[in-house]
């Protein structure tokens, strides 16, 4: 499996879970979940395109 695709998937899922948890309860650093989703989606696109940025 492409490393970018795997990391992108993990960041996207983790960011979405963090965002949903942030809606339910307030915790410090919950705004970073939005950044995790953006970076995760970017890595997903790079991974699906077949490019290896690393």
Image (cartoon, rainbow, N blue to C red):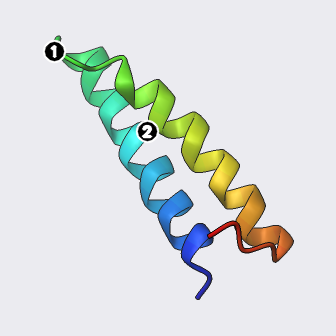
Relative image position of residue 6 (x, y in whole percent): 52, 72
Q: Residue at x 36, y 48 (%)?
A: 14
Q: Which mark is residue 28?
A: 1
Q: Residue at x 25, y 28 (%)?
A: 21
32 on left or right of 3? left
* 10 Å crowding of disc 2: few (<14), some (14-19), many (20+): some
The image shows residue 7, relative to residue 21, as above or below, that is below
The reply to whether discs 1 and 2 touch (Cβ–Cβ < 8 Å) is: no
Q: Of 13 and 3, which appears nearest the observer?
A: 3
Relative image position of residue 49 (x, y in whole percent): 85, 69
Q: Which mark is residue 16?
A: 2
3 on left or right of 36? right
The image shows residue 25, relative to residue 34, as above or below, that is above
The image shows residue 36, relative to residue 53, as above or below, that is above
Q: Of 26 and 54, which appears nearest the observer?
A: 54
Quick one: label 1 or label 2, which is nearer the N terminus? 2
* 10 Å crowding of disc 1: few (<14), some (14-19), many (20+): few
Q: Quadrant of the C terminus?
A: bottom right
Q: Quadrant of the N terminus?
A: bottom right
Q: Residue at x 43, y 60 (%)?
A: 10
The image shows residue 14, relative to residue 46, as above or below, that is above
46 on left or right of 7? right
30 on left or right of 2? left
Relative image position of residue 29 (x, y in whole percent): 23, 19
Q: Residue at x 60, y 35 (%)?
A: 38
Q: Which mark is residue 5?
A: none
Relative image position of residue 39 (x, y in whole percent): 57, 41
Measured Cα–Cα span from mark 1 to mark 2: 16 Å
């Amino acid at each position: 499996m492409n490393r970018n695709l795997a990391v992108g998937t993990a960041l996207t899922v983790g960011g979405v879970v963090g965002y949903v948890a942030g809606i339910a309860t307030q915790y410090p650093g919950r705004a970073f979940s939005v950044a995790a989703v953006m970076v995760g989606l970017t890595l997903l696109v790079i991974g699906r395109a077949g490019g290896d940025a690393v």
